[in-house]
Image (cartoon, rainbow, N blue to C red):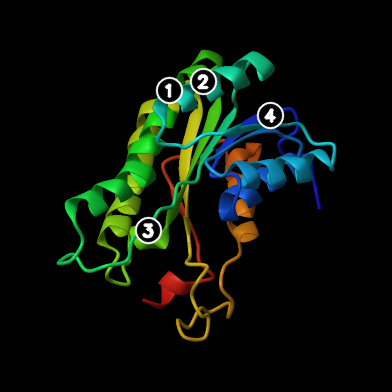
Amino acid sequence: MSHGLLKGRTALVTGAGRGIGRAVAREFAAEGASVALIGDNAQAIHDTSAAMRMQNQRVLEFDVALTNGPAVSSAIDAVIRQWQHIDILVTYADLCRVGSILEDSLNDWRSVLAVNLEAVYMISKLVVPHMIAYENGRVIHVSSVAGSASQGRTGSYDASKAALNALTRSMAVELAPYNIMVNAVAAGDTDLDPQQRKIPIERAPEPEDVAGAAVFLASDYCRYMTGQVLVVDGGLTSTY
């Protein structure tokens, strides 16, 4: 059910062709936002965009890899030309390589951090100045419970999400004077067997669960909350 929580806002969502990114884009649009989609799968981005247009929602689409700095910068410029400003940035970048630290190469390590951390840092640097100009904005990073609790054999992924949480806090402190709230959503693992891992809610998280939290963080209900990592895991980490 839509409540118009984001009516009149413009949002840029990365990784918007799949999973959590797609769910966030659709929930934001349902709440009244104009949404620009960025993703590196042209068909997935187009399908998401087409589904949103069928609902008469305002949407722009960009087939761009988040690690391609010049292309990302061009996409942001196009959004500004079309809509004049960006009120909300949601970064969903989620590359995970499973393997022992004894087996993974340095290139494996770097490839994960390039997507999950460096690309997020880069797009934040590109978008935030537009928010500063209006002295208002919301930045929401999609993190993971792996940033604070590990299953093992995912060292590069865990490190990238822990660093993303730290980046969230640092950005929050720096940007608070400009009325820019920066928070993260730590998502539970959607691949987990809820019985095996004893999730108290007894089901694995769905992308829409994370999207709902993102809507809250983007809304006026979150005007005094910044630097936080909001955990959406069905209570899993409370059992540790």
Query: Tag 2, which secondary structure?
Result: helix
Which amino acid type is shown beneath numbered disc 4? Answer: Arg
The residue identified by callout 3 is 96
Q: Give the mark nearer the N terminus: 2 vs 3.
A: 2
Specify whether 99 is left or right of 23.
left
Check contact, mark 1 vs mark 2: CB within 8 A.
yes
Q: Position of residue 33 (x, y in %)?
A: 72, 34
- For residue 9, the mark is 4
Q: Give the mark nearer the N terminus: 2 vs 4.
A: 4
Q: Nearer the viewer, mark 2 or mark 4?
A: 2
Which amino acid type is shown beneath numbered disc 2? Answer: Ser
Check contact, mark 1 vs mark 4: CB within 8 A.
no
Q: Is residue 187 above or below residue 21?
A: below
Check contact, mark 2 vs mark 4: CB within 8 A.
no
The residue identified by callout 1 is 70
Give 58 or 219, whichever is nearer the viewer. 58
Specify whether 201 is left or right of 189.
right
Which amino acid type is shown beneath numbered disc 3? Answer: Cys
Q: Give the mark nearer the N terminus: 1 vs 3.
A: 1
- Residue 35 can be seen, yes or no: yes
Give 37 or 106, whichever is nearer the viewer. 106
Q: CA distance from mark 2 to mark 4?
A: 21 Å
